Image: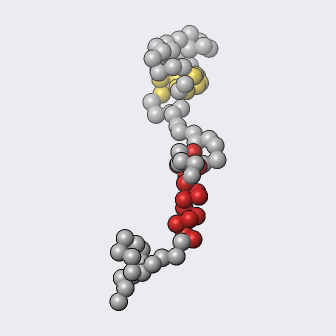
Amino acid sequence: MPTYEYECKSCGHRFEHSQGMSDCQLTECPQCKGRLRRVIGSGIGIIFKGSGFYATDYRKPGYKEKEKKEKSAPCEAAKPSCKGCPSAA
């Protein structure tokens, strides 16, 4: 649920309020009952939680094992499908 920041046009009181995106804007100041305006551009941010983003959360479970096998396998220079090897002379 997003957090929006509001400011009162009468007394200048600023506060944050969590509400759903489809909810109506607040219109009345909780301190003086004056009119509110929603401050644009504040209260929105991305928070990444957990041990990692792409590398640990979204890859297939067998990824690490496959990566280890590929690194430990000897590279055959004469094999044309090996793109990382220098061509055999």
Quadrant assignment for the N terminus = top right
User: Hey, which residue is sitting farthest right in the picture?
Assistant: 51
User: How many numbered circles are shown?
Assistant: 0
Q: Nearer the viewer, residue 19 or 13?
A: 19
Residue 34 visible to an observer of this rendering = no
Q: Which of 45 and 32 is in front in this view?
A: 45
Residue 77 falls in which quadrant of the image? bottom left
Quadrant assignment for the C terminus = bottom left
Q: Which of 7 and 78 is in front in this view?
A: 78
> Colour mode?
secondary structure
- Decide: is 28 above or below 85: above
Residue 40 visible to an observer of this rendering = yes
User: Hey, which residue is sitting farthest bottom in the picture?
Assistant: 89
- Decide: is 30 above or below 68: above
Q: Nearer the viewer, residue 66 or 43?
A: 66
- In percent of width and height, residue 82 lies at 40, 72
Say whether residue 76 is left or right of residue 81.
Answer: right
Residue at x-position 57% and y-position 22%? 18
- In percent of width and height, residue 58 lies at 53, 45
- Decide: is 20 above or below 47: above
Residue at x-position 58% and y-position 22%? 17
Residue at x-position 58% and y-position 64%? 68
- Decide: is 88 above or below 43: below
Residue at x-position 52% and y-position 37%? 45
Residue 79 falls in which quadrant of the image? bottom left
- In percent of width and height, residue 57 lies at 57, 45
